[in-house]
Image (cartoon, rainbow, N blue to C red):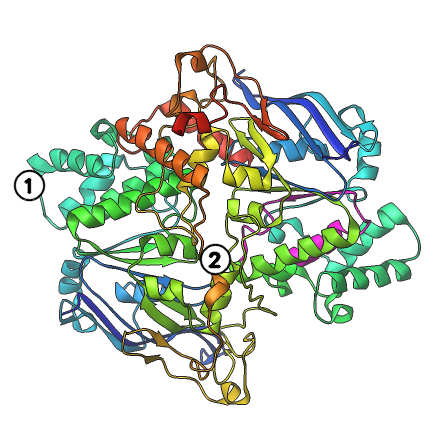
Amino acid sequence: MSASPLIEIRDLRIRFHGDDGRITHAVDSVDLSVANGATLGLVGESGCGKSVTSLAIMGLLPKQSVEISGAIRFDGIDLLQTPDQTLRDLRGNRLAMIFQEPMTSLNPSFTIGDQIIETILRHRGGSRKSARERAVELLRRVHIPSPERRIDEYPHKLSGGMRQRVMIAMALACDPRLLIADEPTTALDVTLQAQILELMRELKAASGAAIILITHDLGVVAEVCDEVAVMYAGEIVERAPVDDLFSAPQHPYTVGLLGSIPRLDHRAEQLATIEGMVPNMAQLPAGCRFAARCPFVLDACTKAPPPLIEVSPGHLSRCIRAPLERLVS
Amino acid sequence: MALLEVTGLVKHFVAQRSLFGRALAHVKAVDGVSFSLEAGKTLALVGESGCGKSTVSRLVLRLIEPDAGTVRFNGRDLLALDADSLRKFRREAQIIFQDPYASLNPRMTVGQILTEPLALHDLVAPAQRRARVAELLRLVGLEPRLARRYPHEFSGGQRQRIAIARALAVEPKLIICDEPVSALDVSIRAQILNLLRELQDRLGLAYIFVSHDLAVVKHIADHVAVMNLGQIVETAEADALFASPRHPYSRALLSAIPLPQPKAKRTTVLLEGEIPSALNPPAGCRFHTRCPFVIERCRSEAPPLLADSTGHATACHRTAELPPADAILPAAGGFSPALAKLVAAFSQKTEGASPAGVGIQGTASATTEAMGTVR
């Protein structure tokens, strides 16, 4: 997108070493970048590596059993080469994350005010009084009614939508440059989801932070993202500006995904289905990882892993048959 | 005659008791719900958490006892049945749940799970049971040899197939599907939805489909009832409801769903505030605290559910005065011409291959499960 991205991931590979000596290739050769003020959607089904990628950015993967290689450049430094102490200074400060489950991410034995103030004092210092004022201000920004009163409440007194607002307020406490949101609305009802998505759009416009939004919901992606990366079996199989991805997908997996969702704006007698299953991540096939399930498969697909090629400006696909329009005209 | 006729169903749960066991507070989970369902059709109950949709589905099966109202199945009053006749009724109505992990006994093989209802209702002679199990597995797109395996060896979608096979074992006329695809990944969700539809066509099943996902409902339902805080606020033929939702709550629900169509032109109705508690629902219309069209009358007087000549019923004082609901869903199709062609090609090629999702490799499914926990 822009000349100097805020975060740039190069050739990220993550392997889990199991107790039985099995090695699981959770993430393979992932390249990503997000510019200031942009929102990248990371889409895929369970186990595709999207959450593991985000945990690697935050430095939250256990060191003992996980092997990470590649580079994650954030604001001029490589997060993978950064000592833990520096990472702790970054997390909650310039790098922030919100999770799917607001109930389990908040500590039940402290008031929400305590938890937000702790973050502010840890990174910004200052007096407790000024931190409290800032916390009230943050709660107001995420539209929590009567924040002066709410700040002294415990998480169990808040509803799911309110808790997710508190999580967002906490993530914003130190004006992060990059916000990672991992399925932030999946646990919420649709009317609350709409409120939270609106809030995220508002905050992005106000703060200019970059956002990585991890989701399985293509509708959410279409509403809030500028660019999308689709992951399958640990790899990025397609990356494109959001309009291009939805109007002319260039990877068969994306086509299958788009065809398999029931839509309010389209009537289909039969939904497309992707047959078969995700490959075993400890014994990956030699060629394309989607080949066994792909209706457009050729012999060449199973011989060598396909590279990520640029089909049109900014639109990348890991498929040797792209551009796919050739297959249907 | 309708297969199922529900009138004036009420269920209040006690939320708090005094020291001496007197009820202090009630959750009005279901408060006067009526609907009917024809054989071979699908009625969807939609609404947000706590609207009472799951409670209705359990009341219909008499898994819990209602406080008031009647349920008639094939003309018989269910609430008058004794234990013996109730068990016979269970042959005709079955339920599948959201979480296939929790609804299958981990210590039983799939064969045992599917044999149990056959034995319980004495449907098939012991010698033929194995053949019937094989037939049931084939019906839901699984290979008969999988009968020897245990539930943990299957993926989420396959487990939901097993739960469906178990429901089909007794040859029911009605299956209640309580959020059957909410826990599944998108591509698996499509397989299960296609399977449910195909089984309905083949076996003439009626479904009550409980869901919060309106896109799924649009795909599968003939008739829709939108619920809010224990009551039906709007009910109509699915096509009519999605083409022009009338109740302000239905409109808000529809407009809140993100469409997989970037820059879609549509009106959005963003509701303010939280969902009120069913413990203490607002007086008058239960939606008035969040309704953008609220007037004084709504705060004091509960609107009745009134049907027009086409059977489209709405519970709103202002039905006639509301602006038309044109732009809540964009009129233009969601698929670009290029995407439509690609999806068609994708499906066509796939159909030639194996029937829906039959393949299983023990190791592969175990890995998918393990990866799922990482997420």
How far, Cα to Cα, is label 2 from label 1? 55 Å
Percent coordinates x, y for residue B209 in the rendering: 32, 57
Image-quadrant location for residue B76: bottom left
Dot in front, 2 or 1: 2
* Mark 1 neighbour class, 10 Å CA radius: few under 14, some 14 to 19, many 20 or more: few
Mark 2 belongs to which amino acid?
A: Pro
* Mark 2 neighbour class, 10 Å CA radius: few under 14, some 14 to 19, many 20 or more: some
Residue B234 to residue A185: above or below: below
Residue depicted at x 28% and y 31% = B351
Taking depth in this image into account, of B296 and B89 the one nearest to the observer is: B296
To which chain does the residue with label 1 belong? B
Residue at which label 2 appears: B330
- Segment colored magenta: A164-188
Q: Residue furthest right?
A: A126
Image-quadrant location for residue A132: bottom right
Residue depicted at x 63% and y 29% = A313
Residue at which label 1 appears: B125
Percent coordinates x, y for residue A66 in the rendering: 64, 23
- Sequence-wise, the earlier of marks 2 and 1 is 1
To which chain does the residue with label 2 belong? B
